[in-house]
Image (cartoon, rainbow, N blue to C red):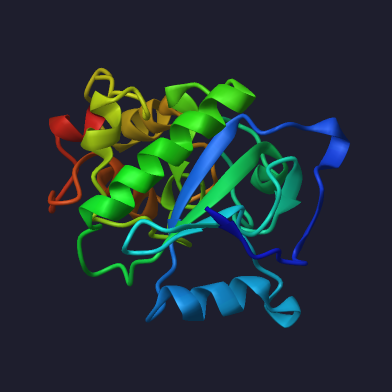
Amino acid sequence: MRAVPSSNCGARRNGLKPHLIVIHYTAMQSAQAALERLCAPEAEVSAHYLIDLGGDVIQLVEEAQRAWHAGAGEWRGHDDINSRSIGIELDNRGNHPFPEPQMMALEELMRGIMARWDIPASGVIGHSDMAPGRKFDPGPHFDWARLERQGLAAHPQRYDAGDAEAFVAAAQRAGFTAEADFDALLHSTRLRRAPWRRGPLGSDDFIL
């Protein structure tokens, strides 16, 4: 790991400490381009860590500080996700798989973060989970099941199937409390649990 400090950070608000990890993709052409943006004051964006395709980890913001990675959104009824989380950016354009060295580095990094801050598997989310319709990362190619098998992300739960109203209620119980229209919410939950699924709401969409 190497450090490339970004000035785009500050103190966590209201004495909050991280109890979430938010996973992102950079959606840029290279890790270097992402690094430059995450450190540019005019961009007003940052993350605690950036992991390139080869598995090299760069720390941009100290974990105790508030990085500017999450933006507007909510998870389990809590806003100001920046003050409640540690953000990890993965070098990925959003249209290709995440290579093995990168995933291995992510897993090692997450184990350390979760131990240091006592973050449970249920506290590991994607950017799209907390901002349905606004954000889509880490996207359909991210292997959530791989993290689940290692205890690094929460396993899905089945809720009683029903109509659209029942689905919204189930999604909120699962943590998807950010304001979103039905289609955006459905797409966001599918990105997390079944990115291959298309079509109208079905009973399998109640596995959240």
Question: Residue 153 appears at what percent x and percent y?
Answer: 36, 29
Question: Residue 80 appears at what percent x and percent y?
Answer: 70, 45
Quadrant of the frame with the C terminus: top left
Q: Residue furthest front?
A: 2
Question: Residue 42 appears at what percent x and percent y?
Answer: 73, 81
Question: From the viewer's perspective, is residue 8 above or below residue 66?
Answer: below
Question: Is residue 83 found left or right of 94 in the rendered image?
Answer: right
- Taking the spot 84% from the left edge, 42% from the top edge, the residue there is 13
- Taking the spot 30% from the left edge, 48% from the top edge, the residue there is 103
Question: From the viewer's perspective, is residue 54 above or below residue 108?
Answer: below
**Location of residue 168 (image quadrant):** top left
Question: Is residue 40 found left or right of 50 in the rendered image?
Answer: right
- Taking the spot 37% from the left edge, 49% from the top edge, the residue there is 182
**Location of residue 125 (image quadrant):** top left
Question: Is residue 18 found left or right of 147 in the rendered image?
Answer: right
Say whether residue 80 is visible: yes
Question: Is residue 157 found left or right of 199 in the rendered image?
Answer: right
Say whether residue 208 is visible: no
Q: Nearer the viewer, residue 2 or 186?
A: 2
